[in-house]
Image (cartoon, rainbow, N blue to C red):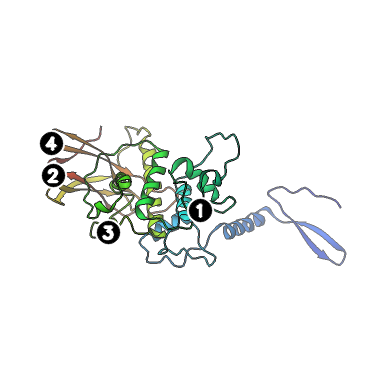
């Protein structure tokens, strides 16, 4: 049989006729259009049907698009289900893009080398191998057990720390159930709360011993990934000629307790894609100088061009007067 050459601009269609088979070259435009339709069909994942109304719905959709999370056999995400260690480790490793590229091995690593109850060859095995280098996972971890909120916060913080070196001021956060947080996890919880990666409930409780849900974990992983992107962007020198997209900056301070104030910084942004964050705080002579910077929009998304108020809040001891620091 004669083998005809095929390039990427053509496709050879085989058509049955009375005289046997003959070949027809399809126009490049027709082939390209068909290829795009086919790729869009197979490349797009159906949205989870059970996350409507969930407070982390947008974050979950984003993680799904990135391949960080997936659904069950019925295509559901099950946002209110308890998160297992297998799911949590996989979510952190994928969400923070942790890898082993820079590590040399004498032999091929196996999950069973580092853990007593993690089997080799499972869907989560590779994630546990990676986690053994970054997340400080105990050897006795069992993949099917539920993760508590404090343990997930600790492992997530370890993952963040392995990606970038950063320093945050020691926060004075009021957590009503702080005494319930295990001493070895308290700093991780405090810093994740301060960075806006985790949050308290309406009663200012963290509920450290409660099993974390799949939705809560996805929300924290999304915010952790965004936090790392902000750190990476802030590490790049800004051009003096580039004006800040934020205008009308305002600072508000309100007492939270007798010793702590909630300090809120508000600004006007060009559209809802922008955000604002406190990059650093310098304490000097009874004043707390807040250095703020914009959170840049996702370049792959389209936003309505509507002026939008953005804000961020930090907690500062009442002995300090908050001041907006002028850009250098």
Dot placed on the residue nearer the N-terminal end, 3 or 4: 3
Q: Is residue 160 left or right of residue 283?
A: right
Q: Which residue is mark 4?
A: 286
Which residue was labeled with disc 3?
A: 201
Which is nearer the eye, 169 or 140? 140
Q: Which residue is mark 2?
A: 318
Give neighbour class at mark 2: few <14, some 14-19, many 20+ (Cα, 10 Å): some
Asked where in the image residue 244 lies, by quadrant, the reply is: top left
CB atoms at circles 3 and 1 under 8 Å apart? no
243 vs 222, left or right, is: left
Looking at the rendered image, the disc whose residue lies closer to the viewer, 3 or 1, is 3
The span from disc 3 to disc 1 (Cα, nearest Å) is: 29 Å
Viewer-closest of 102 and 154: 154
Say whether residue 35 is left or right of residue 196. right
Please tell me whether mark 1 sits on a helix, a strand or a loop.
loop
Q: Secondary structure at mark 3?
A: loop
- Callout 3 crowding tier (Cα within 10 Å): few <14, some 14–19, many ≥20: few
Instruction: Name the spot of residue 171 as percent of width and height, x first.
Output: 24, 43
């Amino acid at each position: 049989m004669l083998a005809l050459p095929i390039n990427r601009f053509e496709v050879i269609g085989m058509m049955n006729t009375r005289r046997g088979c003959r070949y027809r070259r399809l126009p490049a435009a027709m082939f390209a259009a068909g290829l795009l339709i086919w790729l869009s069909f197979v490349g797009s994942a159906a949205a989870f049907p059970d996350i409507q109304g969930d407070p982390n719905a947008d974050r979950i959709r984003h993680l799904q698009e990135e391949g960080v999370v997936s659904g069950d056999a019925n295509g559901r995400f099950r946002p209110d289900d308890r998160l297992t260690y297998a799911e949590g480790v996989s979510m952190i490793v994928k969400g923070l893009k942790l890898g082993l590229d820079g590590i040399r091995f004498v032999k091929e690593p196996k999950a069973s080398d580092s853990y007593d109850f993690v089997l080799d060859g499972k869907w989560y095995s590779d994630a546990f191998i990676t986690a053994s280098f970054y997340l400080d996972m105990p050897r006795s971890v069992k993949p099917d057990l539920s993760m508590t909120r404090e343990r997930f916060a600790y492992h997530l913080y370890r993952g963040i720390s392995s990606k970038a070196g950063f320093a945050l001021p020691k926060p004075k956060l009021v957590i009503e159930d702080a005494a319930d947080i295990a001493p070895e996890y308290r700093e991780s919880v405090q810093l994740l709360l301060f960075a806006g990666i985790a949050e308290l409930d309406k009663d200012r409780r963290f509920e450290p011993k409660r099993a974390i849900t799949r939705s809560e974990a996805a929300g924290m992983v999304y915010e952790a990934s965004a936090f790392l992107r902000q750190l990476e962007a802030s590490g790049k020198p800004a051009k003096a000629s580039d004006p800040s997209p934020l205008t009308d900056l305002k600072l508000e301070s309100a007492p939270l307790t007798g010793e702590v104030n909630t300090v809120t910084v508000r600004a006007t942004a060009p559209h809802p894609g922008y955000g604002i964050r406190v990059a650093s705080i310098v304490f000097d002579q009874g004043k707390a100088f807040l250095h703020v910077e914009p959170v840049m929009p996702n370049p792959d998304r389209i936003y309505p061009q509507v002026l939008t108020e953005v804000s961020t809040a930090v907690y500062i001891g009442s002995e300090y007067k908050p001041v907006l620091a002028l850009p250098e």
